[in-house]
Image: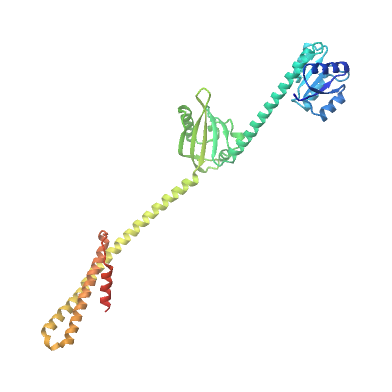
Amino acid sequence: MNPSIRLLHLEDNPLDAELIRLRLEAAGLSCDIRWVSGKEAFESALAQETFDLVLADSKLPGYDGLSALRHVRERQPELPVIMMSGELSEEAAVDCLKAGATDYVLKQRPQRLDAAVRRALVEKEELAALRRAEEEVRRQSLFLRQVIDLNPTFIFAKDRAGRFVLVNQAMAEAYGSTVEEMLGKAEADVTADAQEVARFLKADLETMDTLREVFIPEEKLIDATGKVRWLQTVKRPIVAADGTADGVLGVAADITERKRAQEEILRLNADLEERVRQRTAQLEAANKELEAFSYSVSHDLRSPLNTIDGFSQLLEQAAGDKIGDKGQHYLSRIRAGTQQMSELIDGLLSLAKLSRDQLRSEAVDLSAVSRKAAQACR
C-alpha cells in the first residue's frame, strides 16, 4: 500500500476543497489533507506540522496565494507548492513560478491535478536525494580536506596553466600563506626564486606531456622564513576524459632532517677515516721504533751472551779435570742459560717482523707447548 500523503490545502471555499479531495481519491492518491482557509491557520499549521505538499488558492480574502507561497519558501524551501486558481493569467502564472511554485492548476481543469501532484512528489524525492548526495559529497570533501591538512607532507594539484587548485595546510604554511590565499595562484605568485619556479614548472609539464609519473629524489625549496628545505617529490598527471592531462597532482615529503643526518654521517665517516689514517701512521711509526729497538736490544744482548758462552767454553777446556763434577754442572747450567737467552732474542726479532709479515694459519700442538713450559719450570 502506498503511504498516505500529508497535504496542506489553503482554500477559502469548502466546496472547492471537497472537490479537490474527491479528485485526488479518484486518482488513487491516498491523502491526509489538512484544510485551512486563512493566513493564521495556514502559517500555524506549517509551523507545527510536517507536510509533503501544499495546495494554495491563488486568491483569498485578505491573503493571496503568492504571499502564502513566499512564506513557504522562507520557512521550508524544498516543500513543493502547487497553485490553484479559477482564473490564473499567464502573467500571474509566470510570477508564481518565479516565486518558487512547483506547478499551477486551473480549477476548470482538475484532471491535471493528480499528474501535477505525482510530479511534484517525484521532484521532491529527487530533490531530497540530490540534497542527500550533495551532503554526502560535502561530508566526504570535508573528511578528505581534514586528512590532507593533517598530513605533514606537501600535497598539491595544479592545472595546465600552473595555478594551484589544491593545497594542504603544511604546504601553505611553508609558503607563509593560507590554503585559501594560495588557491588560484601560480607558482610565480608564491615563490620568489625564478630558478625554482622554472624547475617546478618544467617537472609539471614533463609529467602532463608524457602522462607518466615523475619521481624527484631531491629538490631544494626556500620557505617563507628563508630556511632551505629539501623535498622528495612524486608528481602524477591528472588525466581528463579525452586522455590528455589537464593538471598535475604532487606529493612532496620534507627530507631536510634526513639529508642533514646523511651529511652528518658522511662528515663523521670522513672524520673517522682521518682518525684511522692518523692511528695507522702512528702504529706504523711505533712498529718501526719497536723493530729498531728489537734489533738494538738483540745486538746489545748477544754481545755479552757470546762473551759468557765463549769464556765458559774456554774455562771448561783449560781447567776441565780441576773443576770437578759440580763445576762441570755449573758450567753446563751457564751455557744452557746463554742458549735460552739467545732463543729469547730470536723470539724478539721474530715478534718485530710480525707487523710486516702476512698472517697465516697453522696447527699448534698446545700439549707440546704445555710440556715444554712445565719442563722449563722444573
What residue sits 55% from the left and 36% below the top?
A: 155
Residue placed most toward the observer, 113 or 207: 113
Specify whether 134 is left or right of 43. left
Q: Residue furthest front?
A: 1
Q: Can you see residue 345?
A: yes
Quarter where residue 84 is shown: top right
What residue sits 78% from the left and 12% below the top?
A: 111
On the image, the x and y values in percent for residue 262 come to 44, 48
On the image, the x and y values in percent for residue 267 come to 42, 51
What residue sits 74% from the left and 20% below the top?
A: 120
Relative vertical location of residue 293 with respect to residue 54 in this rendering, above or below: below
Relative vertical location of residue 324 with respect to residue 351 in this rendering, above or below: below
Specify whether 182 is left or right of 35. left
Identify the image quadrant of the N terminus: top right
How many numbered badges does the structure rendering display?
0
Residue placed most toward the observer, 101 or 190: 101
Identify the image quadrant of the C terminus: bottom left
Quarter where residue 97 is shown: top right
Residue placed most toward the observer, 339 or 162: 339
Relative vertical location of residue 49 with respect to residue 320 in this rendering, above or below: above
Residue placed most toward the observer, 143 or 187: 143
Q: Can you see residue 95?
A: no
On the image, the x and y values in percent for residue 38 come to 87, 22
On the image, the x and y values in percent for residue 87 come to 82, 11
By what rule are the colours in the image chosen?
Answer: rainbow
Quarter where residue 373 is shown: bottom left
